[in-house]
Image: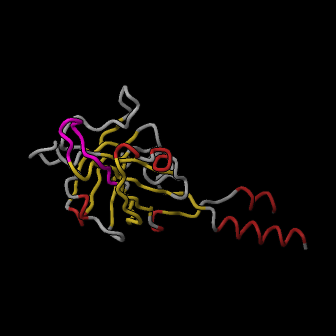
């Protein structure tokens, strides 16, 4: 009887042990956000000498924080990019402000997989009070967090006074059932 209960429990746990199709650390190479007409290549970025999240050196590419998780893994996969240069040159996330909750975001990784996310939250934070730990250390799911400048351009600081953060969650079609060794151990 105990063995049967353990077997049933193991099957139940095994059925809900998920891994994403992107369980490996495959870097993202492209982001597409149809609602904002965004389609940009992605390059890896790190941190600046001041310890801030770096951005791509141009106004065409988005940047993936290479010291964090890849899109599709549990945690906050961070992708950033310029909104513009403070004047007339638009960046890849110029239209990110047009995104709404429920909109879709597709991320293609280096393995050719396209991961589908849906926007679940949109926040704007003062640049001087940006909650880095909260943004970067959220492990409540397989999250994608897109960061760009927002608000008013401050010429003396050569940046904007706010940061826009769009949070999206990986969609279930990207999950596959992961077999567990616990099932075998109870047989």
Q: Is residue 158 magenta?
A: yes
Q: Residue furthest right?
A: 1
* Figure colour scheme: secondary structure
Q: Nearer the viewer, residue 150 or 182?
A: 150
Residue at 35 percent across and 30 percent down: it is 48
Residue at 33 percent across and 61 percent down: it is 105
Residue at 68 percent across and 58 percent down: it is 180
Coordinates of residue 10 in the picture (x, y in percent): 75, 66
Q: Nearer the viewer, residue 173 or 119?
A: 119
Residue 45 vs residue 96: left or right? right
Residue 168 vs residue 73: left or right? left
Q: Is residue 151 magenta?
A: no
Quadrant for the N terminus, please.
bottom right
Q: Quadrant of residue 44?
A: top left
Query: Does 114 appear above or below 109?
Result: below
**Tag count:** 0
Q: Residue furthest left?
A: 88
Coordinates of residue 27 in the picture (x, y in percent): 39, 43
Residue at 87 percent across and 68 percent down: it is 3
Q: Quadrant of residue 58?
A: top left
Coordinates of residue 103 in the picture (x, y in percent): 32, 69
Query: Does 131 appear above or below 166?
Result: above
Coordinates of residue 75 in the picture (x, y in percent): 51, 51
Quadrant for the C terminus, please.
bottom right
Residue 26 vs residue 182: left or right? left
Per the picture, the main secondary structure of the magenta-coloured stretch is strand
Q: Nearer the viewer, residue 136 or 33?
A: 136
Please give the range of residues in magenta: 153-164
């Amino acid at each position: 009887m105990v063995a049967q209960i353990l077997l049933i429990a193991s099957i139940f746990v095994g059925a809900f042990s998920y891994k994403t199709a992107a369980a490996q650390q495959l870097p993202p190479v492209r982001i597409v956000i149809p609602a904002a007409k965004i389609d940009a290549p992605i390059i890896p970025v790190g941190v600046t000498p001041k310890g801030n999240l770096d951005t791509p050196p141009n106004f065409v590419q988005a940047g993936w924080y290479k010291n964090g998780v890849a899109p599709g893994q549990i945690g906050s996969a961070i992708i950033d990019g310029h909104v513009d240069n403070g004047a007339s040159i638009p960046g890849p996330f110029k239209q990110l402000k047009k995104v709404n909750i429920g909109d879709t975001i597709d991320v293609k990784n280096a393995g050719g997989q396209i991961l589908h996310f849906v926007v679940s939250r949109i926040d704007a934070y003062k640049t001087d009070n940006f909650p880095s730990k909260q943004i970067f250390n959220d492990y409540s799911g397989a999250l994608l967090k897109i960061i760009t400048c927002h608000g008013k351009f401050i010429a003396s600081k050569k940046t904007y006074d706010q940061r826009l953060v769009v949070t999206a969650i990986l969609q279930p079609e990207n999950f596959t059932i992961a077999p567990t060794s616990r099932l075998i151990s109870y047989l």
